[in-house]
Image: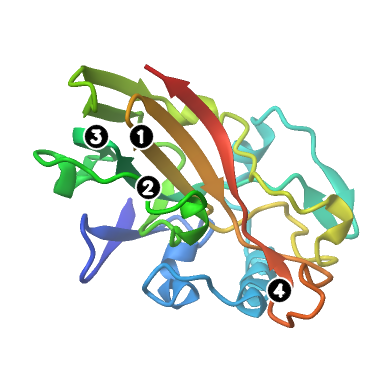
């Protein structure tokens, strides 16, 4: 049994989910971590959330962790690589005549189902993506179904199996093991990384983004750069 909280002013409806059996509390239960607008949260806030997560019981989570194939190891008190049990999701459509992305019984490109989409706004447009706004999705409710028309007028359909793409439930990050803040992730769990499904003309790509605080500044003269949140390609296919 789950409790669903629908947050206002989002399309499609943004949903936060909590297990009633005492399982891990999702980042979706803490919407202020995203400022309610998907913008980058504070690394210090994520440190506090990670500490809270480390103190929670693992009821309902042990089986999910032990069934994944990635061998974890401990570095400076962190169990790595990190794993995730829930995720946030968003779909992006570019260079299409029309496009529909259905996931978890929601339409994620309602603006594009009967209208063309623009080209990406800049070469580094993914750096400007906000955090995914559909929160607290338990891994995994089923595949995403994509129906679209590419710029040459060809109609396509595809079923994207996120459970297969992320079968080890591993968080994708470019943070080196020894750069993680010591003892921040003793249980090896991360709160809700963002998963994006991008449709761009004839190509579908899946990306992940996770905000990981670091021991040192990533930009030496920027005091707010003690974290990384790279958008990392997990899978791509051209049809």
Q: Which residue is rendered at x = 79% and y = 33% of the image?
A: 71
Q: Earlier in the sequence, mark 3 or mark 1?
A: 3
* Left or right side of 133 for 102: left
Residue wearing tag 2? 120
In the rendering, at what x and y percent does residue 229 appear? 62, 59
The relative height of residue 209 versus residue 180 in the rendered view (above or below) is: above
Q: Quadrant of residue 152?
A: top left
The front one of 18 and 141 is 141
Q: Earlier in the sequence, mark 3 or mark 4?
A: 3
Residue 105 visible? The answer is yes
- The residues bearing labels 4 and 2 have C-alpha atoms spaced at a distance of 26 Å
Crowd rating for badge 3 (residues with CA inside 10 Å; few <14, some 14–19, many 20+): many
Q: Which residue is rendered at x = 75% and y = 44% of the image?
A: 81
* Left or right side of 234 for 69: right
Q: Earlier in the sequence, mark 2 or mark 1?
A: 2
In the rendering, at what x and y percent does residue 205 appear? 45, 33
Q: Quadrant of residue 144?
A: top left
Crowd rating for badge 1 (residues with CA inside 10 Å; few <14, some 14–19, many 20+): many
* Quadrant in which the C terminus appears: top left
- The residues bearing labels 1 and 4 have C-alpha atoms spaced at a distance of 31 Å
Residue wearing tag 1? 200
Q: Which residue is rendered at x = 41% and y = 67% of the image?
A: 38
The relative height of residue 185 versus residue 137 in the rendered view (above or below) is: below
Contact, CB < 8 Å: mark 4 with mark 2? Answer: no
Q: Nearer the viewer, mark 3 or mark 4?
A: 3
Contact, CB < 8 Å: mark 3 with mark 1? Answer: yes
Contact, CB < 8 Å: mark 2 with mark 1? Answer: yes
Q: Which mark is residue 96?
A: 3
Q: How is the image coloured?
A: rainbow
Residue wearing tag 4? 225
Q: Nearer the viewer, mark 2 or mark 1?
A: 2
């Amino acid at each position: 049994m789950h409790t669903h909280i629908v947050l206002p002013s989002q399309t499609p409806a943004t949903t936060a989910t909590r297990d009633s059996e005492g399982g891990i509390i999702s980042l979706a239960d803490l919407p202020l971590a995203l400022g309610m607008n998907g913008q980058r949260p504070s690394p210090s806030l994520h440190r506090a959330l990670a500490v809270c997560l480390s103190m929670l019981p693992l009821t309902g989570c042990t089986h999910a962790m032990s069934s994944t194939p990635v061998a974890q190891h401990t570095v400076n008190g962190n169990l790595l690589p990190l794993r995730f049990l829930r995720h946030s999701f968003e779909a992006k459509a570019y260079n299409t005549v029309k496009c529909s992305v259905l996931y978890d019984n929601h339409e994620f490109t309602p603006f594009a189902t009967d209208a063309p989409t623009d080209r990406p706004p800049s070469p580094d447009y993914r750096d400007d993506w906000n955090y995914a706004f559909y929160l607290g999705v338990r891994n995994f409710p089923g595949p995403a179904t994509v129906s679209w028309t590419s710029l040459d007028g060809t109609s396509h359909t595809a079923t994207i199996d996120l459970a297969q793409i992320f079968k080890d439930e591993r968080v994708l990050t470019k943070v080196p093991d020894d750069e993680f803040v010591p003892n921040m992730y003793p249980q090896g769990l991360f709160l809700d990384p963002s998963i994006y499904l991008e449709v761009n003309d004839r190509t579908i790509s899946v990306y992940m983004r996770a905000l990981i605080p670091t021991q040192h500044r990533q930009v030496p003269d920027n005091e707010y750069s003690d974290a990384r949140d790279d958008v990392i390609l997990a899978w791509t296919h051209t049809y």
